[in-house]
Image (spheres, rainbow, N blue to C red):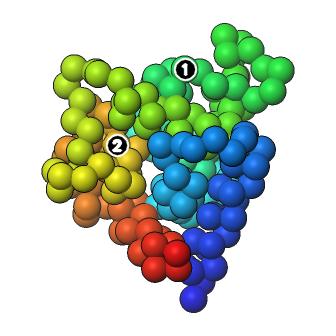
Amino acid sequence: MSLVKTALACVTTTLVLVMVYGQQKELIGDDCLGCLCEGTTKCNSSIGCQAPFPGAYFCGAFLITRAYWIDAGKPVITNDNPDELGAFERCVNDLYCAAETVRRYLTKFQTEKVPGVVKDCNGDGVIDCHDFAYMHRMGAYGCNDPTVRNTDFYKRFKTCWKVVTEAS
């Protein structure tokens, strides 16, 4: 039951994000965004930044890298400067800014023609939240890597997604 509560808390958080950022129709649905957050860190917004191995640096509830943030267009929190030292960390450690970063990243690679990027990451003939999960975890250029299915991230995401879709 704890997973159901966590999934619903993540969905609630993402619904708040929509109210803050507007109500326009987004390519990445709020329920999908909530499950990406759940899959990544169980939506732990106080996780901070981590360097789990040399050359790696992941921050925030979505474990976003600087390259991911740059690909997303360097979103920032209100009144911040994307070129200022620390802007990346301030954004991706803020749940609202981090969610906007994920939306922008996934939207960019799903809507623009980018050589080498597969949009139907899992090859099932449908572009949906599962593809966004692959892309979020493996990156736009490696999203067709099936090993994502064996990760704790994908197992948590899939469980969350099942709960959310069965509830709607």
Find residue 101 and report its image quarter: top right
Residue 47 can be seen in this image: yes
Label 1 is placed on what type of residue? Answer: Gly
Crowding near the residue tagged with mark 2, few <14, some 14–19, many ≥20 C-alpha atoms within 10 Å: many
Residue situated in front as seen by the camera: 100 or 138: 100
| Disc number placed over residue 21 in the picture, else none | none
Could you tell me residue 128's position as x and y percent? 35, 53
Secondary structure beneath label 2: helix
Residue linked to disc 2: 135
Find residue 85 and report its image quarter: top right
Residue situated in front as seen by the camera: 23 or 150: 23
Secondary structure beneath label 1: loop
Could you tell me residue 111's position as x and y percent? 37, 30
Find residue 3 and report its image quarter: bottom right
Quadrant containing the N terminus is bottom right
> Residue at left 53%, top 79%?
167
From what the image shows, is residue 113 above or below residue 136? above
Could you tell me residue 116's position as x and y percent? 19, 25
Q: Earlier in the sequence, mark 2 or mark 1?
A: 1
Residue linked to disc 1: 73
> Residue at left 43%, top 28%?
108
